[in-house]
Image: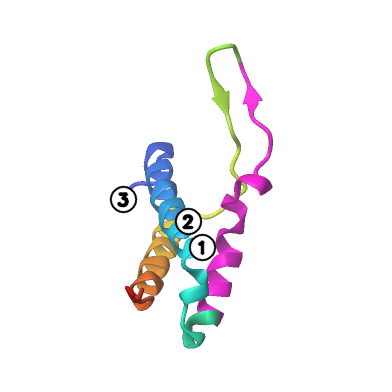
Amino acid sequence: MTDTPKNQTLITGQLLQIRDKLIAKRHLIPATYKAEWQQIEAQTAMFDASSQSQFNHYDSASMVKKSSFQGSINDLLKLVDAMRNLDRQIKIAVH
């Protein structure tokens, strides 16, 4: 996948969806995967809305929000894969 702003936005969207899902299920993460979760959580903390910088207005029609992520699209894909793998390890029991 090429490293274009559009592709980065799409992969970042996937990352955020999976991250939100994992955060909602974080109390179900098996003890054997806690260290992996903590590492992923630290690597993706920059995507939290609370840690994002302000929007920059260039004109009345557009807004740009700078990202603090400095990696490539391959780095984003690796994070997405790691989160998907972790998500597969979490089992939700229906009572």
| Spot occupied by residue 56 in the image (x, y as percentages of width and height) | 65, 26
Residue drawn at point x = 67 percent, y = 48 percent: 51
The answer to which of 40 and 70 lies nearer the viewer is 40
Could you classify mark 2 by the number of other residues whose Cα lies within 10 Å: few (under 14), some (14-19), or many (20 or more)?
Answer: few
Q: Earlier in the sequence, mark 3 or mark 2?
A: 3
Q: Nearer the viewer, mark 3 or mark 1?
A: 1
Could you classify mark 3 by the number of other residues whose Cα lies within 10 Å: few (under 14), some (14-19), or many (20 or more)?
Answer: few
Would you place residue 80 above or below residue 69 in this image?
below
**Dot 2: what SS?**
helix
- Amino acid carrying label 3: it is Met
Q: Residue furthest front?
A: 95
Q: Give the overall secondary structure of the magenta segment.
A: helix
| Spot occupied by residue 7 in the image (x, y as percentages of width and height) | 37, 43
Q: Nearer the viewer, mark 3 or mark 2?
A: 2
Q: Badges 1 and 2: C-beta atoms under 8 Å apart?
A: yes
**Dot 1: what SS?**
helix
Q: Find the magenta span and give its range.
A: 35-58
Residue drawn at point x = 61 percent, y = 53 percent: 46
Between the C-alphas of marks 1 and 2, the distance is 5 Å
- Amino acid carrying label 2: it is Asp
Residue drawn at point x = 39 percent, y = 59 percent: 77
Residue drawn at point x = 39 percent, y = 37 percent: 6
Would you place residue 10 above or below residue 34 in this image?
above
- Amino acid carrying label 1: it is Ile
Residue on which disc 3 sits: 1
Residue on which disc 2 sits: 20
Q: Badges 3 and 1: C-beta atoms under 8 Å apart?
A: no
